[in-house]
Amino acid sequence: MMKKLSPITFFIVAGEPSGDAHGASLMRAIKKEKPESRFVGHGGDGMTKEGLERMYHTNQLGIVGFSEVIKHLPFMLTAMNRSLERLKELRPNRIILIDYPGFNLRLAKKSAELMVPITYFILPQLWAWKEKRIKVFQRHIDQSLSIFPFEKNWFEARSVITNFVGHPFSDIIGPETNKTQFLSKHGLSKSDNILTLLPGSRQQEIDRHWPTYCRTVEILRTETPELKVVVGKANGVTIPNVIDNLLYEEHDVRAAMAHGTAALTASGTATLECAVLDTPEVVCYKLSVLSGQIAKKINRSPFISMTNLIAGRKIVPEFLQQQANAKNLSMALKPLLKYKNERQKMRDGFEEVRRLLGLPGAYDRAAKLILKRTIYG
């Protein structure tokens, strides 16, 4: 009688909602190849649905900014220690780290003595700041998988072999809800001008952006009282109801992105998602005062939005910290809401970005590379 093979076990860590989405899709792709695969670690609802034996939820781990990390340091230390203890018990075949560098790079260093090979999927933005962290990759990361075309050359110039697997957003076909359904659901018509608000996926982001978003809407409505506003609301966040006549989309946020005339977007994956969906946008981001001052000193990137970073030039207007105020945001949004030719100019740039993202199938390619390295070394 043949002995039943043990499942391949992965310790996988995603600390943010975007990482959870990537992690869930990667797990699904791995299970297509190896259905018996086991996943233990940290993630959100998406990864849990795919079978993750979860220790911490992304809602617990999602901390933004330098000062915020200091405030939550005791909790993060506990999460780190529990992770290391579980790794020692589990002895997985491979560790998969997804973005979330503040935690994941420390985990890579501290788990080195266990000699468990590590894949890093969705690489940290070392080209923008904290380049010294490249040493962790050089010493401890067994496999680096990038979703951005420009990262491969940057990492390999620093002696880190990197595979560009393509960007998962190349697989985006469209939202679940078509435009007719979306308009009907919210009592809108085809002739309406629709501003989509995307204030972020973490409560910290909502708290910082929402007052400015509200003031921006008030300014725009003084000139265009009939402007319709749809808020794309992420799971697990609370948005204060401080201005009238806002519509909320929670079930299919991608529909709110796709069917808006223009969007006001907090910097992050949503900026690139709007570009893929061909929705003109203005990008902003706010950190705490202390975090913003530190970021200003160490950030070497010319842009904050992934759309502009991938293109290597300014396609979408972007505003950071004090510049992310209602006056600037409303001035940048007005021409996009009012003039079709302004929207088309931005869409021409989006076409270039979509071409640079690579072919569909990023998760499948990543899964095959991970399994090949895990099984054959």
Image (cartoon, helix red, strand yellow):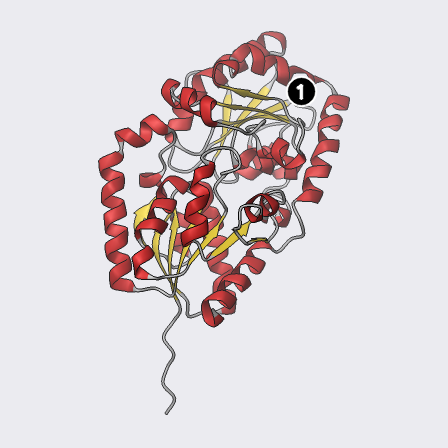
Residue depicted at 54% across the width and 64% down the height: 368
- Look at the image and tell me whether residue 239 can be seen: no
Q: Quadrant of residue 276?
A: top right
Q: Amino acid at mark 1?
A: Leu
Which x, y percent locates residue 14?
40, 47
| Horizontal side of residue 81 vs 360, given as left or right | left
Q: Residue furthest bottom?
A: 1
Which residue is labeled 1 in the image?
337
Residue toward you, 204 or 255: 204
Which x, y percent locates residue 343?
72, 25
| Horizontal side of residue 336 vs 304, given as left or right | right
Q: Is residue 105 above or below residue 211?
A: below
| Horizontal side of residue 369 vs 201, given as left or right | right
Residue depicted at 45% across the width and 50% down the height: 138
- Look at the image and tell me whether residue 321 can be seen: yes
Q: Secondary structure at mark 1?
A: helix
Which x, y percent locates residue 294?
41, 23
Residue toward you, 127 or 362: 127
Q: Residue furthest top?
A: 222
